[in-house]
Image (spheres, rainbow, N blue to C red):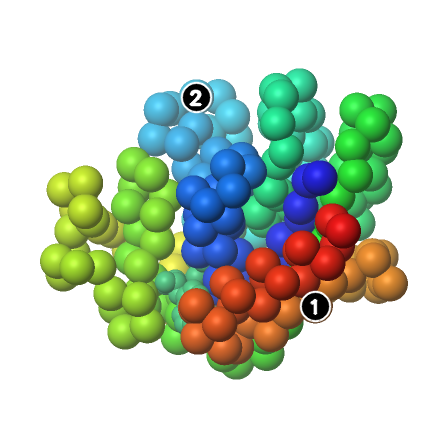
Amino acid sequence: MDVIFLGPPGAGKGTQAQILEERDGIRQLSTGDMLRRNRAAGTELGRKAQAYMDRGDLVPDDVIIAMVEDELNKPGDVLFDGFPRTVTQAEALDAMLRRHDRQAAVVLFAIPLEAVEERLTGRWTNPKTGRVYHEKFHPPARPGIDDDGTPLVQREDDKVETVRKRLDVYERQTSPLIDYYGDRLIPIDATKALQTVTAELAAKLKGAVA
Ligand code: ADP
Ligand code: AMP
């Protein structure tokens, strides 16, 4: 079964997705990571996305939907992290899942927007793998360096002004998905410590598949 992670930026979706990928082998499909990889490689897609990402706006739906469609032709269950982010994307995903005869559980990372600002401004990322740390809540073993030796960086769009813009965009364009999915949503308390969230997620996903 596929899984969709819904929730504001900074809720901990990527962190938990990486844990599930390592533990269960489900493939994390982070649209944000895919876009950043395209930017780093200088592809046309990356160039198209750049200005939107730097402003904290969403990249246009048609660009994102085409990018995800390609990935669904590959085998194995997928964990959608950061997609869908608009009702148009959610409708397109539902149609794609139906076409591929797939089903998805939808998890809502419930957390007030006030609580995510500090998570985002203290986030450090491995630009090669997308692995994330937090200077206070989840520090790397060696300050500023990942276990693979890669220097960690702070994302350009994690500075405070862009974070506020992204939270506003979430509220206006993405939070309507809470109504869209309605009864299908599996809420988890994303305000808790990282390991507590991992445990709640495992228990609830087990229930969803059973
Ligand atoms: P998202 O993918 O939803 O944008 P991330 O997984 O990148 O969020 O997490 C945002 C920041 O918060 C990162 O710095 C991460 O280390 C930290 N973080 C993740 N989960 C928790 C948690 N449960 N408690 C505190 N900090 C967390
Ligand atoms: P993220 O890594 O999920 O925080 O995404 C970083 C940025 O990439 C967002 O602020 C958007 O500009 C863009 N992005 C990622 N996923 C999507 C999506 N599903 N729809 C539109 N834009 C996206």
Q: Position of residue 109 (x, y in %)?
A: 61, 65
29 or 85, which is in the foreground? 29
Q: Left or right? Give the position of 178 relative to 28.
A: right
Up-down: is 36 above or below 125? above
Q: Position of residue 162 (x, y in %)?
A: 45, 62
Can residue 26 be seen? yes
Q: Position of residue 141 (x, y in %)?
A: 17, 59
| Residue beneath disc 1 | 187
For label 1, being within 8 Å of ligand 1 is answered no
As measured in the structure, the alpha-carbon distance from the residue carrying label 1 to the one carrying label 2 is: 37 Å
Q: Left or right? Give the position of 66 relative to 113.
A: right
Q: Secondary structure at mark 1?
A: strand
Can residue 109 be seen? no
Mark 1, Cα crowd under 10 Å, few <14 / some 14-19 / many 20+, is: some
For ligand 1, the image quadrant comes to bottom left
119 or 157, which is in the foreground? 119
| Residue beneath disc 2 | 43
Which three-letter amino acid code belongs to the residue tagged 2? Thr
Q: Residue at x 62, y 36 (%)?
A: 78
